[in-house]
Image: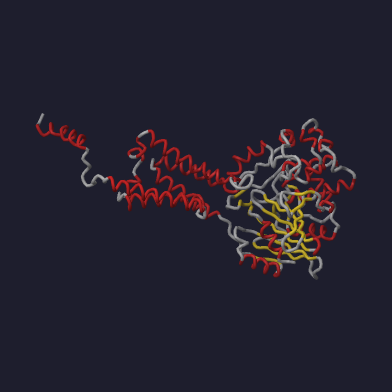
Amino acid sequence: MPPTRNLLPETRIALASDQAPPAGRPAPSGRRRMAEVVVGVGFVATWVVLGLLSWLGFLGLVLLGVLLLAAFQTVVRRRPLRTLLARDTVGFARGRPGKVLAAAVLIGIPVTMVLVSVSGARYGQYADDSWKALLMLAVLAVSYLASRRLLLTVLVAATTVALTSWALAPSLATARNGDPQVLTHLDQQAGWGMLTGYHNLAVAEIDLDAPRPVRLAGIGADDTTPMEVGSMTKAMTGLVIADAVRRGEIRMDTPVSTYLPQLHGSPAGNVTMHELVTHTSGYAEFGAATLRRAAWKAPLGQNFFTATSAEMTTETKAQDLSDRGDYAYSTLGSATAGQAVAAAAHMSYPDLMRIRLFEPLGMSHTAIEEGHALVAGGRSATGLPVQPWVMDAYAPGAAAVSTTGDLAKLATALLDGTAPGTAALEPTTATDQSNTRIGAFWQISTWQTGQTITSHAGQTGGYASYLGLDRPRHKAVIVLSDVANDASDLGTQLLAHRR
């Protein structure tokens, strides 16, 4: 073997034993290593503080983390940026710890997004923005399998979700129609930022003491545009329940199993009708099977209120009533109450509402969305296209579809006392808010303006609604939106400024 070849192993051994650094990259001194650690801790602290302030949002925080890491690599460590974009299998993820770290990041980001989505209120914003976590998971998986570069994968995924969110975010329609006075009021609200997040919007203002009692207007929608009214259905059901009491068909102090014998023998069957309409029954907001269905259908924009009568009976009988006597909002309880009054009247729930409420008030564009869709899909507050909520057994909780024109007829009849079941508007029970009591589903609140407002709001996966009555002043405001934002915010503002 030539002598020159014998020198190669010896050279390698010498390098290994002396630990000489590669050419062109001096070994960092202990002092420099300490400086890198200190600056790195400072970068992490900055990232954490900005995260706690939360004004960036989770996606913004992820993108900021990528930028800070790139800055640390290039400015502090003075390494080429391309080293961060090298394949993980030839870098930090060659060993098991690196692979575990990569997996933790890839799984941890969408899991954190889900946790953020369900935080806050009882169910947070899961139905509204959980689709972002699903999209993030999909992009992370595809991008990492294709590139094996963790930093690049996170950057691509976060940017994709951020741009998709921006593209889908609802923007206010431009077409305007209807009463100039109402449009002026909407312009005023727009100036205060109250129309941000809306798309198609229809509004009615009622004043029985004015020369023109009903004023209707819209932006992108009008008084004949049908929209899901969500939980405002409960308020309508409350009117029919109060009317059934007047007719002698039901009693409010009677157990619900009197009218729904399939609930006999269960604690849920012993709950009275009064407890159901005042949300003091101890029922959960939704049945367990419905919640499980929502967990995977909501991120896809699909309807999850598809429980049949048999399925809802099973959900209802499973209630433990641990909070019975305390106010706790329950769509399951309201659906049970609505089905009970329908059974007592020997009608289906849609027929009951049509015959007892919609037809007597001339609400010809209002119906219960059961069996088939009555509207096109709306959008979540974050812009995800959402299926109509076509319901079955849960219909009394949220299945009505209406227009501002029809709801103006309802509000007028409630203000002048000609609507069926107006006893439902009388407060009987305390709620979890000191300034609010409840009748038969209707909320009665005393505002700082001195107004006493009787109201109910509603929301489905793709729509939102509000109906507020200032009964002493004979005024009302109605808001319908094809985006599932909180229409009560706009409705209360319009009503507060109409004293």
In what quadrant of the picture does the N terminus appear? top left
Which residue lies at the image location 39% right of the left edge and 48% below the top edge?
A: 41
Q: Residue furthest left?
A: 3
| Residue 340 or residue 173, whichever sits in front | 340
The answer to which of 254 and 27 lies nearer the viewer is 27
Closest to the observer, 375 or 273: 273
Q: Residue at x 83, y 39 (%)?
A: 343
Q: Position of residue 62 (x, y in %)?
A: 46, 49
Residue 408, picture quadrant = bottom right
Give the left or right position of residue 255, taking residue 175 as reference. Answer: right
| Quadrant occupied by the C terminus | bottom right
Q: Reply above or below: 311 against 470.
A: above
Left or right of 416 on screen, residue 20: left
Image location (x, y in percent) of residue 266: 77, 32
Q: Nearer the viewer, residue 169 or 332?
A: 332
Residue closest to the far right: 248
- Above/below status of 200 relative to 354: below
Where is residue 338? Give x, y as percent. Answer: 79, 43
Is the residue 499 above or below the residue 391 in the image?
below
Drawn side of residue 456 relative to residue 171, left or right:
right
Which residue: 43% across, 50% down? 45
Q: How many marks?
A: 0
What colouring method underlies this structural image? secondary structure
Q: Position of residue 167 (x, y in %)?
A: 52, 55
